[in-house]
Amino acid sequence: MSLQVKFVPFSPPQNKDKKSVSKGTYETNPPWHQVQQKVQGYSRYPQGFTGSLSSSSILSAARTLAGYTTVGIPTAAGTLEISGNSLGSFDYVSKGTTTLRSFSVSDWFTTTEDTRSAWVIIKGDLTINAGQTLIPTVRKLFQVVYVSGNLTVNGSISMTGRGANHSGTGNSGGATTAVDIRIGTGTFGAVVDPQIPAAGGSGGVTTGPTTGKNDGAAGTNGGTGGGGSGYSFQLGVAGSGTAGTCFTGGTGGGGGNALTAGSGVANGGKGGNANGNACNGGTGNPGGNAGSGIFAEVGNDGTGGTLIVIVEGSLSGSGTIVSNGVIAKRLDSGRIPGGASGAGSITVLYGTNPASAVTLTANGGGGQSGGNGGNGTARKLAIGSN
């Protein structure tokens, strides 16, 4: 008696919950993406992903990308839609179990600024050694780090100073509308359907003509921080800071001395221009123009960015996950400072070990006598059965 074997070509499972991509169809939350099945499911899609992606949440999208073969260099994909909201376009890199001993940005991120989010997909374990920081060198809409196994952070994962200028003005790479970013669907810890809200903390309002400054407001419920106002002096009127968004902390206003300074540009744009003798510009993308005189300075560059870290296994280590705002130019030698920028937003979804020594920090930039940037969100949420 002979044994007969029938070969049946594989095709992704079909059901009513499909989303269209340029190279076929996929499920937004396939059944093999249960914890005990993740590794076995990775071979189901034999090619890297290059199309557009639509999914119910960041978590679901990350699990979908993990279903494709590894692409060891940063790859430009298509547009991204999460829970019906357009989030611009995205890049991703996928690797197997990795220990980051020496960081080279070209191994992890593209050089496209402002208009694309950056996704790091690790199919296995990720260890970041002490002294190493996983951070893009240019501004990004947001960064996602997904680890199917265990994550050990002895160095740092960061979006400090990498908030996007999505205003479409100045040196912005392009305009992207702020929307709510759904991180997960279901209950994570005590949070139902966690998200990054479209609007973060408000900016510090203009001050003057009396001396003073106002701080940016803190972000809540996943939000980023607002930018601080500039400092007003001698009947000057300082510029206001701007509100944070889902893609960036707010920008700082310019310092004013006997004149009226400019406010920061919304949506992570330029810091407010200073006006008057010895006045500094506000912090932003880029910093605002200097006022007049030899002591005046251009504002600092950078705002806090949005960072989402997902680890299906355990989170451990003694390092940091950070997205701070950027300080204002200091007040010394007679300078009148602008405002600092707001912090970004950090959400860590973890499988086990939430009490590790890994520190989460989202602090607003120091105003240095100008308005402080508002603090952002820094939270850990259990994935649970989701």
Image (cartoon, rainbow, N blue to C red):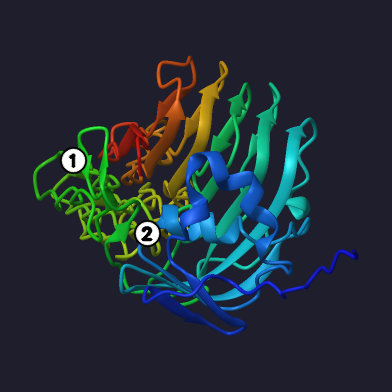
Q: Amino acid at mark 1?
A: Lys
Q: Secondary structure at mark 1?
A: loop
Q: Nearer the viewer, mark 2 or mark 1?
A: 2
Q: Residue furthest front?
A: 1
User: Residue placed at 38% from the left, 53% from the top?
Assistant: 281
Q: Nearer the viewer, residue 231 or 315?
A: 315
Q: Vertically, is 19 above or below 153?
A: below
User: Residue placed at 53% from the left, 31% from the top?
Assistant: 313
| Nearer-N-terminus badge (2/1) | 2
Residue 27 in the image, given as x and y percentages of width and height: 47, 69
Location of the N terminus by quadrant is bottom right
Q: Which of the 4 image quadrants contains residue 168?
A: bottom left
- Horizontal side of 11 relative to 272 (left or right) equals right
- Horizontal side of 203 relative to 171 (left or right) equals left
Q: Can see residue 367?
A: no
Residue 50 in the image, given as x and y percentages of width and height: 65, 75
The answer to whether the residue labelled 2 contacts the one labelled 1, judged by CB atoms less than 8 Å apart, is: no
Q: Vertically, is 319 above or below 9?
A: above
Residue 191 in the image, given as x and y percentages of width and height: 21, 39
Identify residue for label 2: 57
Location of the C terminus by quadrant is top left
Q: Secondary structure at mark 2?
A: loop
Q: Amino acid at mark 2?
A: Ser
Q: Can see residue 359?
A: yes
User: Residue placed at 37% from the left, 37% from the top?
Assistant: 383
Identify residue for label 1: 213
| Disc 2: CA contacts within 10 A as few (<14), some (14-19) or many (>=20) | many
Q: Which of the 4 image quadrants contains residue 43?
A: bottom right
Residue 81 in the image, given as x and y percentages of width and height: 40, 72
